[in-house]
Amino acid sequence: MKCLESLIVAFSMYSKIPVPQIEWKKDNMRFALCYFPLVGAVTGLIVWLWSLISGYLGVGTVLSTAVFVLIPVAVSGGIHLDGLLDTADALSSWQTRERRLEILKDSHAGAFAIIVCCSYFLAAFAVWSEADAGSVQILTLGFVLSRALSGFGICTFPCAKNTGLAATFANAADRKKARVCLLLEAAACMAAMIWLDWRRGIAAAAAAVIVCALCRRMALKKFGGITGDIQGFFLQVCELAMAAVLVALQYAPAG
């Protein structure tokens, strides 16, 4: 029963998929982060189904790509995109660490958030419009990998403050067991990517790990630790980086 409740907590927090409403308690939040990658699995499944449907119906590139880009936003409700934009505003402020943390909590979108939002969707549209079937197949697993690494970060990296969603989930988690679970999920996802196509799989996995390391460094240097917004920033950048690397490989000489 607790496992089911943890699953419900994960989906109610990180997705817009309808689930029963339950009270969040320490007992049912201990392993909620372990189920976070399943939200990515649902996202990847929908993307894969759309690739089949759009191919079968002969849907044009523009419409097909637009749906690819919007599916993750629709499933997540934009929670990770919100983190990307809040973090972009904070990083672009060139203020003190304390002021950057205040900007993260500000519900208003600044000019830099709008610029980053437009740039992100334009870049995502461009990359996904070039992705072939093999890249799309690996990227469906990328949604799982990005969330496994994000959850691992919440369980492992220091939090910038004692309040907020990241701190709430980190404090409630059985960190040792959750870290092991999330690492196993990430490793299984990477192995599946490599099994599908060793060259592309290694490239996508490497891109995800590098972005994770760079975002951790940025979070510690600029904010003193992670927050929910920063983890959302990581997730969005990670998924775009994997897609960009895979498309770049499509044009690289084989062998």
Image: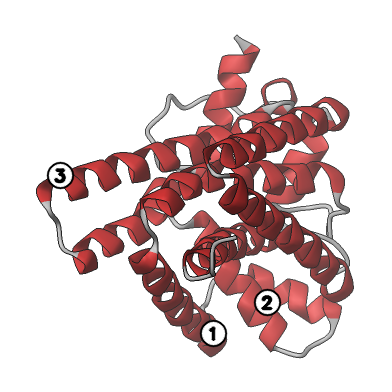
Residue on which the image places disc 2: 103
Disc 2 vs disc 1: Cβ atoms closer than 8 Å?
Answer: yes
Quarter of the image for residue 233 reads: bottom right
Answer with mark 1 or mark 3, whichever residue precedes in sequence.
Answer: 3
Marks 1 and 3: which is nearer the front? 3
Q: What whole-number distance in Å separates the C-alpha atoms at marks 3 and 2?
A: 46 Å
Q: Residue at x 71, y 55 (%)?
A: 206
Badge 1: how crowded within 10 Å, few (<14), some, or many (20+)? some
Residue on which the image places disc 1: 110
Q: Quadrant of the N terminus?
A: top right
Q: Is residue 35 left or right of residue 214?
A: left
Residue 231 shows in this picture: no
Quarter of the image for residue 102 reads: bottom right
Please, what is the three-letter code of the amino acid marked with disc 1? Gly
- Compare residues 81 and 104 and report the one nearer the observer: 81
Q: Where does the image place residue 237, in percent across and percent down from the top left? A: 60, 65
Please, what is the three-letter code of the amino acid marked with disc 2? Ile
Q: Residue at x 20, y 63 (%)?
A: 63
Badge 3: how crowded within 10 Å, few (<14), some, or many (20+)? few
| Tag shown at residue 67 | none
